[in-house]
């Protein structure tokens, strides 16, 4: 247990260092304490493959099969922080993956609706999150770019795969004064993490935050 605590603490320190080193891009020298606390509570090895358990607390992305990855912890923290999550928020996550980002969000908000296009990942993540005691998470298998219209609108939307352009359906499902974080760009080319904000009148603004590299957003079709 002591060794696990050390690994978690070391990872949080690395995330804090990354936040300071990228502040010129993000405008955030540090991530919110609540976000770091949430990440420190989560046992990341529960969300990686058996072969990668010894690397679960390395600050880098890892493969989870099906051409997908579990994101670098710093990027998970930054994307969560950019949403400015509040305890009463209802959040849509596009791209459940192994459920790691889902768990971070679930620690911070009222409810998370998460969409995953790969059936095997969706099923595994739903079972994993339930086994870990997350009762405020709903996972379904469907096309992420279409969002989850039946549960909209959302206080915040987080997309964990790169879209070639921002899906109109997701913008429509974002509440006034809501925030969406999404990587945008072509696979293998420059991608940018974008913060989408909608004001009280429904006007939308996009702000480029940080160059990133994500797997592509996959359509169910």
Image (tube, rainbow, N blue to C red):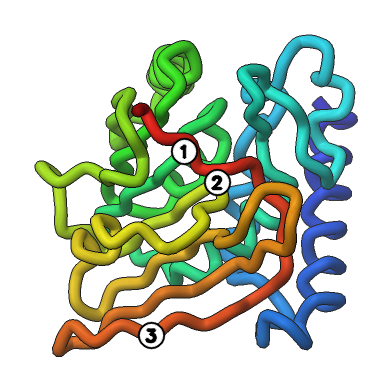
Classify mark 3: residues with Cα within 10 Å, few (<14), some (14-19) or many (20+).
few
Name which residue lies at 48% across and 35% down: 218
First along the sequence among labels 3 and 1: 1
Q: Is residue 118 left or right of residue 49?
A: left
Location of mark 2 (residue): 161
Could you tell me how many numbered marks the image carries? 3
Residue 88 in view in this figure? no
Looking at the figure, which quarter contains the C terminus?
top left
First along the sequence among labels 3 and 2: 2
Name which residue lies at 44% across and 71% down: 84
Residue 168: x and y in percent read: 28, 62
**Marker disc for residue 95:** 1
Location of mark 3 (residue): 205
Q: Is residue 20 left or right of residue 44?
A: right
- As displayed, is residue 201 above or below residue 179? below
First along the sequence among labels 1 and 2: 1
């Amino acid at each position: 247990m002591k060794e696990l605590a050390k690994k978690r603490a070391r990872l949080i320190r690395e995330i804090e260092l990354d936040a300071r080193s990228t502040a010129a891009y993000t405008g955030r020298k540090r991530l919110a304490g609540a976000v770091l606390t949430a990440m420190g509570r989560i046992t990341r090895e529960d969300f990686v493959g058996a072969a990668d358990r010894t690397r679960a607390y390395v600050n880098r992305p890892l493969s989870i099969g099906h051409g997908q990855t579990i994101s670098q912890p710093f990027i998970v923290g930054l994307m969560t922080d950019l949403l400015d999550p509040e305890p009463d928020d209802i959040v849509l996550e596009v791209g459940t993956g192994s459920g790691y980002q889902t768990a971070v969000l679930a620690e911070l908000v009222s409810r998370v609706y998460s969409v995953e296009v790969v059936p095997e990942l969706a099923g595994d993540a739903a079972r994993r999150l339930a086994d870990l005691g997350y009762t405020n998470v709903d996972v379904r298998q469907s096309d992420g770019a279409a969002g989850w219209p039946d549960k909209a609108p959302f206080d915040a939307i987080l997309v964990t795969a790169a879209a070639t352009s921002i899906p109109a359906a997701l913008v429509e499902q974002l509440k006034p004064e809501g925030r969406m974080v999404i990587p945008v760009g072509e696979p293998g080319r420059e991608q940018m993490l974008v913060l989408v904000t909608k004001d009280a009148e429904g006007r939308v603004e996009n702000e480029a935050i940080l160059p990133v590299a994500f797997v592509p957003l996959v359509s169910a079709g």
